[in-house]
Image (spheres, rainbow, N blue to C red):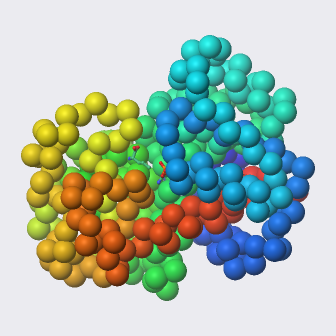
Amino acid sequence: MNHLLSIKDLSQAQLVDLLSLAKEIKANPKQYQNALAGKSVVMLFEKPSLRTRVSFDIGINKLGGHCLYLDQQNGALGKREPVSDFAANISCWADAIVARTFAHSTIEGLAEHGSVPVINALSDMYHPCQGLADFLTLSEQFDDLSKVNLAYVGDGNNVTHSLMYGAAILGVNLTVICPQGHFPDGQVVVEAQALAAKHGGKLVLSSDINDIANHDAIYTDTWISMGDNADLADIKAKFGPYQVNSELMQQAGANFFMHCLPAYRGVEVTADVVDGEGSLILHQAENRMHAQNAVLVTLLAD
Ligand code: CP
Ligand code: NVA
C-alpha cells in the first residue's frame, strides 16, 4: 500500500488489517504515541471541513507527528502553479500529503508527481477515510460484517462510492436506493458488483424506496454535495420520498442510523432520527481519527 486514493485499491486482507489496526490504536493509544515521530504531513484542502481537518490534525499529533494545514487562499490547486509542482515541492519536505479536492484527478496528480504517500481526504469521486471509519463503526456493533444488511438512501455520491467498494470487499450486503438520475457512477457500480460477487456480498441498486425493508442500518448523506450546483427546491421535490425519518427506519426494521455529516435536519434526515438513540454519527466521527491513524501508521511508520 503506497497511497490511499480509493478503497477499491485495497485487497480484502489490507482492508481487514487497517480496520483491526484502527481498533488496536483506539484501544492502546499510548503504544502509538511515537509512531510518527519526526514525520510531517501536509494537508491541502480545496473545500471546507470540520471532521476531516480536525481528526487528521489531532490524530497526527497523537501519533507524535506534525501536520501543516494549507487552505487554498489562492484558489483551486493548479491555478498558481501546476499540481505536479505542488506534489514535487511538498515531497522535498513532507512525509505524506493529505488532500481534499474538487476533482479526483488532482489527487491522482499529487500521487503521480510526488514521491510521498497521498491520502484522499475527499474528492468528487471518493471519500475513503469516511468509508474506513464507517466500517470500523459497523464492526463495533456487529461481530460478523458479512451478516450485516446496510442500506444507503439518497444521492449516489463520493460517500456512496466508498461505501460500495468497502461493502463489496468486506462482503457486507448493501442496498443503494436513489432517485432516478442520481445513481452512483456506472463504472463504480460495475466494479463494486464484481468485487461483491468475489467476496460473497450482495450489492443491489434500486430507486424503489420500498426496497428498504429488512436492513440493519440506514445511511444517508447530504442531497447536495460540495461543488454541486443543484437547486435545493428542485432537489427537495425529487428526493422527498427518500428522506430518512422514523417511518422509514421502522419500515426497514433498522436499529441504526448513519451519516458522514454535516447533516441537514429536516432535509435528508429528520432530527429525531439523526439525534436519536440508534444514531451512530458520533461514533463515525470519532472513528475517523482512529481509521486515519491506522492508514498513517501503515503508510509511514518505520
Ligand atoms: N464527514 C466529513 O468528511 O466531514 P467534514 O466535511 O467536516 O470533514
Ligand atoms: N458528499 C458530501 C460529503 C461531505 C463530507 C460532499 O462531498 O459534500
Q: Is residue 144 above or below residue 191?
A: below
Q: What percent of the width, then of the height, locates residue 155?
A: 27, 49
Callout count = 0
Q: Residue at x 34, y 81 (%)?
A: 277
Q: Residue furthest top?
A: 80
Q: Residue at x 46, y 75 (%)?
A: 138
Q: Is residue 69 above or below residue 264?
A: above
Q: What percent of the width, then of the height, locates residue 243?
A: 18, 60
> Quick one: 76 or 15, which is closer to the camera?
76
Q: Residue at x 58, y 44 (%)?
A: 120
Q: Residue 26 falls in which quadrant of the image?
A: bottom right
Task: Inspect this view and state whether residue 12 appears.
Answer: no
Q: Residue 207 falls in which quadrant of the image?
A: bottom left
In this rendering, would 268 be left or right of 20? Answer: left
Q: Residue at x 32, y 68 (%)?
A: 274
Q: Is residue 49 above or below residue 82?
A: below
Q: What percent of the width, then of the height, locates residue 299?
A: 75, 52
Q: What percent of the width, then of the height, locates residue 262?
A: 40, 53
In this rendering, would 5 be left or right of 225? Answer: right
Quadrant in which the C terminus appears: bottom right
In this rendering, would 177 be left or right of 84? Answer: left
> Quick one: 161 or 69, which is closer to the camera?
69
> Quick one: 263 or 88, which is closer to the camera?
263
Task: Inspect this view and state whether residue 248 appears.
Answer: yes
